[in-house]
Image (tube, coloured by chain):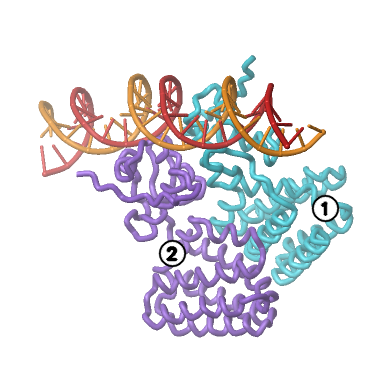
Chain colours: A purple, B cyan, C red, D orange
Amino acid sequence: MTKQTDLQKNADAASLVDSLVEAIVDGVMDHRYAPGQRLVATDLAEEFGVSRAPVREALHVLAGEGVVELVANRGARIRKLSRKERVDFLEFTEALCMLGVRQGVTRIDEGDNRKRLDEHFSVIEEAWSRRHAADFVDALYRYHIALNRISGNGFVKFFYERPYIRFYTIMLADLAPGENWEQYISNYREIHQTILDGDQAAAMECFSSHISWVLSFMKR
Amino acid sequence: MTKQTDLQKNADAASLVDSLVEAIVDGVMDHRYAPGQRLVATDLAEEFGVSRAPVREALHVLAGEGVVELVANRGARIRKLSRKERVDFLEFTEALCMLGVRQGVTRIDEGDNRKRLDEHFSVIEEAWSRRHAADFVDALYRYHIALNRISGNGFVKFFYERPYIRFYTIMLADLAPGENWEQYISNYREIHQTILDGDQAAAMECFSSHISWVLSFMKR
DNA sequence: GTCGATAATTTTGTATGCAATTTCGTAAGA
DNA sequence: TCTTACGAAATTGCATACAAAATTATCGAC
């Protein structure tokens, strides 16, 4: 029995390979493919009703992105990060977000930036109130996407929204906030407020000490 | 006449696609392929004496990496960064290096870290004395690779050494140091010294103000 | 039952074929 | 001279084919 997953071939110029990349990333996001799991080209081809060629090309894109690990003669598997790798990644990504904070603060009053950022923050609050780790981490991620866009650094925007950053970020849900729901939201309320206040020094200080705190309990 | 470029098929497990990726990146590095240039799969296939399939896969890896831009039905071209994009990229990459500095300082006395970092610095000095922008930028890049390795954050190491970071970094050679050779090396001597001294606060302060200075003259 | 060798099956890697699309050259018309 | 139109050539995207490698299954020895 062939269960064909629909490829939403965006009416526009999205190529088949692009659709496949997106479909596979989606599959990873909603845990249909688990980290470490092997991805057999033939199976995917059948699942999506295409030949192996575009599937392989999609897997190579994902390998370039870092979502997938490609070993010669052994095919592809979803990349799996050790605990240390995830902590390292968090440290890395937070250093980036710091840049978003620094530059975002200076532009908070342009256009509807303030309103938009505030909306994103309420999603964080909402996920927090439900104590839903995955949604919480996702909301934090989207908040920083918004902030990075506001910051105006095109490269940070480009980078932070790449599939594998999204993917790795989501994988942090089992490390944070851990047992620290209260402190976490409290920190972010302060960060958000200082950003809204346009106080760059305070925002960076807040965010920086939040990072230190998060890393301290993640590294134990 | 078919001029076949040698693919150095590393004796070990490096697949054909990997070799192609490396060969293409090398081609970009020594300016045989210019940013914006179109890469025709058939031509590359012929050049390397293979079929189009692995070439296409290599191009998809590079697309995932961000070295190449892939447009549906129009094939691949070497990614070209505008001036603003390059400045944004520099801002981005410096934020990362900041992390390397912060953590690297704390480990400067482990093993032969001090010696190795010092060796990398002398390469910077050497390129500086020749006033060779490309070599200078490359030496700076390698210095930070060494520092990132010392820092112990595996993700920063992994990330900073990816082909496209190397590629983009090299593309900064026409923006820096510009007319500012003297100030640039002077800053780096101070950065290097504070790192050797193990003075984290001073190192971060030095590096941070160096970044501000570089960006100020690049943004003009 | 466990281990190891061997055969059968699966899966990968690369080449090739062909239709669809784009690109390029050329010529007609304003 | 500059567009615009059109047809030929080039190029891409996807499917298919097949050899090489890896994986799994089978079977016998202990």
Displayed quadrant of residue A145 = bottom right
Displayed quadrant of residue B85 = bottom right
Coordinates of residue A130 in the picture (x, y in percent): 37, 80
**Chain to which the residue tagged by mark 2 belongs:** A
Q: Amino acid at mark 2?
A: Ile
Indicate whether B164 appears above or below A110: above
**Left or right, B194 with reference to B78:** right
Contact? badges 1 and 2 (CB < 8 Å):
no
Coordinates of residue C17 in the picture (x, y in percent): 41, 20
Coordinates of residue B213 in the picture (x, y in percent): 81, 64
Q: Which residue is mark 1?
A: B177
Indicate whether B170 appears above or below D25: below
Q: Residue at 51% x, 76% y: name it.
A: A120
Res. A44 in view: yes
Indicate whether B75 appears above or below B195: above
Q: Amino acid at mark 1?
A: Pro
Q: Which class describes the residues within 10 Å of circle 2: few (<14), some (14-19), or many (20+)?
A: some
Whole-number angstrom distance, CA of label 1 to CA of label 2: 39 Å
**Left or right, D21 with reference to B98:** left
Which numbered tag is attached to residue A44?
A: none
Displayed quadrant of residue B43 = top right
Q: Residue at 64% x, 14% y: name it.
A: B1
Relative to the observer, which residue lies in front, B51 or A12?
A: A12
Q: Which class describes the residues within 10 Å of circle 1: few (<14), some (14-19), or many (20+)?
A: many
Which numbered tag is attached to residue A170?
A: 2
Coordinates of residue B77 in the picture (x, y in percent): 62, 39
Relative to the observer, which residue lies in front, B142 or A136?
A: A136
Secondary structure state at the residue bearing disc 1 = loop
Q: How many marks?
A: 2
**Chain to which the residue tagged by mark 1 belongs:** B
Q: Residue at 56% x, 64% y: name it.
A: A93
